[in-house]
Image (tube, rainbow, N blue to C red):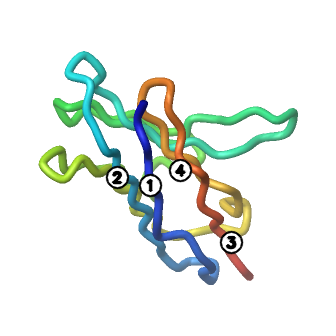
Amino acid sequence: QVQLVESGGGTAQAGGSLTLSCTRDRTFSEITAMAWYREIPGDQRELVAAIQTDGSTRYLDAVKGRFIITRDDAKMTAFLQMNDLRPEDTNVYFCNYFNYWGQGTQVTVST
């Protein structure tokens, strides 16, 4: 079992920034990716950003150039720096590590 604790959500104005963090309490050596997801209609989640231990990253097209995912493995933490926020970024963001999910953190962007 892995617990993921998220923080950093909140409210920002359009054009502003927020940084989310996700800390896990253990590591599986064979599991390398950490990721952030958000909800979409149909009770689904879409990948927002993912990062491997080698630093390679992947982003949802809608956030490319605005969001940056990083990780600090010594602290077992991943970060999602969200810049130039837009109202359509309003959502609950979930941290993911293998089959484990964080509780979700609300991000609200006001106009």
Question: Residue 31 versus residue 58: which sits nearer the camera?
Answer: 31
**Numbered disc in front, either 4 or 3:** 3
Residue sitting farthest toward the left = 74
Question: Residue 32 versus residue 88: which sits nearer the camera?
Answer: 32
Residue 71 is situated, as x and y percent measured from the top left of the image, at: 25, 48
Q: In this view, does 60 lie above or below 104?
A: above
Crowding around mark 2 (Cα neighbors within 10 Å: few <14, some 14 to 19, many 20+) is many
Task: Tell me the residue that label 2 is attached to.
Answer: 23
Which residue: 39% across, 62% down?
81
Q: Which image quarter is the N terminus in?
A: top left
Task: Tell me the residue that label 4 is attached to.
Answer: 63
Badge 2 or badge 1: first in the primary sequence: 1
Task: Tell me the residue that label 1 is attached to.
Answer: 5
Residue 20 is situated, as x and y percent measured from the top left of the image, at: 44, 63
Residue 15 is situated, as x and y percent measured from the top left of the image, at: 56, 77
Measured in 3D between alpha carbons, the distance from the residue under mark 4 to the one under mark 3, in whole angstroms, is 15 Å
Crowding around mark 3 (Cα neighbors within 10 Å: few <14, some 14 to 19, many 20+) is many
Badge 1 or badge 4: first in the primary sequence: 1
Residues under numbered marks 2 and 1 in contact, where contact means CB atoms less than 8 Å apart: yes
Task: Tell me the residue that label 3 is attached to.
Answer: 108
**Numbered disc in front, either 1 or 3:** 1
Which residue: 85% across, 39% down?
41
Q: Which image quarter is the C terminus in?
A: bottom right
